Every structure is written in C-alpha cells, then in structure tokens.
Image: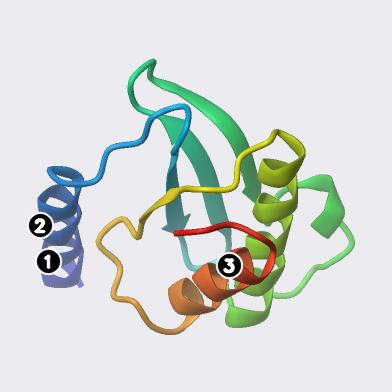
C-alpha cells in the first residue's frame, strides 16, 4: 500500500513541474479518496482556487452509498464544468495528480469535456 502511494506521489511531482495554471487557463486538479472525489480549478500565478466541486457538495447530500466510484466522478466532472462555464472559463490544463488515466479519473475528464471544458 505504501509503495502505491509513493509511486503516485512521484508521478504527481513529476507532472507538477510541467503543469501550471493561470487565470486565463487554470489548472483542473483532481483528488480522490476511497469515499469521495474532489476537483478544483486553481490559478497558480496568484495561488488561489477559482472554482471547486466535490461529492461532499449539497447536490450529492442525499446519496449515502460510495461516492468514490465512476458514476460519481462523472457527476463531479459535469458539476465543475458547469461552474467553470458560469465563471467564463472554457480552457483549462488538466492535472491528474499522479493518478493513472483510467477508471474514475478518465470518466471525470470525459464528463468535464462533455460539459464544455477544453483541455
């Protein structure tokens, strides 16, 4: 288990050397735990979060089952896309935080694209 976390941390640090978000093109960062999925649009130049969404938001309050699965990743991807579009953001840089691009991370990215965000 610890080896998996270290490998993800290494991948995350390697990717963060290249991925940088600005106000015009913020960084879409995803984090997932066993029970929840979190996403943020971050302006790295100023160091603040522009928009955020997660399975802990009020929209998903009634759901009591596991919120860290592919179905919920799609819902969070659509939610962050709609919130970003309402703020006038269309183009982003995707930061997968060292997670491999499959499963819930891929489903999240595809839902964000379908929601109107351009990677």
For label 1, the SS is: helix
The one nearer the camera, 1 or 46, is 46
Residue beneath disc 1 = 7
Q: Position of residue 95 (x, y in %)?
A: 34, 53
Against 63, is 89 above or below?
A: above
Q: Residues within 10 Å of mark 2 (few under 14, many from 20)?
A: few
**Can you name the residue that lies furthest to the top here?**
46
Is 58 situated left or right of 22 in this image? right
The residue mark sitting in front, 3 or 1, is 3
For label 3, the SS is: helix
> Which circle's residue, 3 or 1, is located before the other in the chain?
1
**Colouring method of the image:** rainbow
> Which circle's residue, 2 or 3, is located before the other in the chain?
2
Against 4, is 97 above or below?
A: above
For label 2, the SS is: helix
Residue beneath disc 2 = 10
Q: Position of residue 111 (x, y in %)?
A: 62, 71
Q: Residues within 10 Å of mark 1 (few under 14, many from 20)?
A: few
Q: Tags 2 and 3 in contact by the CB under 8 Å rule?
A: no
Residue at position x 46%, y 48% in the image: 92
Distance from Cα at disc 3 to Cα at disc 1:
27 Å
Q: Residues within 10 Å of mark 3 (few under 14, many from 20)?
A: some
Distance from Cα at disc 2 to Cα at disc 3:
27 Å
**Can you name the residue that lies furthest to the right here?**
62
Q: Position of residue 87 (x, y in %)?
A: 71, 33
Q: Quadrant of the C terminus?
A: bottom left
Residue beneath disc 3 = 113
Q: How many numbered marks, from 0 up?
A: 3
Q: Tags 1 and 2 in contact by the CB under 8 Å rule?
A: yes
Quadrant assignment, res 20: top left
Q: Position of residue 1 (x, y in %)?
A: 20, 73
Residue at position x 38%, y 15% in the image: 46
């Amino acid at each position: 288990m610890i080896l998996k976390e270290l490998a993800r941390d290494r991948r995350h640090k390697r990717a963060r050397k290249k991925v940088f978000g600005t106000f015009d093109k913020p960084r879409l960062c995803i984090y997932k735990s066993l029970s929840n999925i979190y996403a943020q649009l971050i302006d790295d130049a100023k160091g603040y979060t522009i928009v955020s969404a997660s399975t802990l938001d009020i929209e998903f309050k009634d759901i009591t089952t596991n919120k860290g699965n592919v179905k919920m990743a799609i819902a969070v991807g659509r939610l962050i896309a709609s919130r970003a579009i309402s703020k006038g953001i269309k183009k982003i840089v995707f930061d997968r935080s060292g997670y491999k691009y499959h499963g819930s991370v891929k489903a999240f990215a595809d839902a964000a694209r379908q929601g109107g965000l351009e990677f």
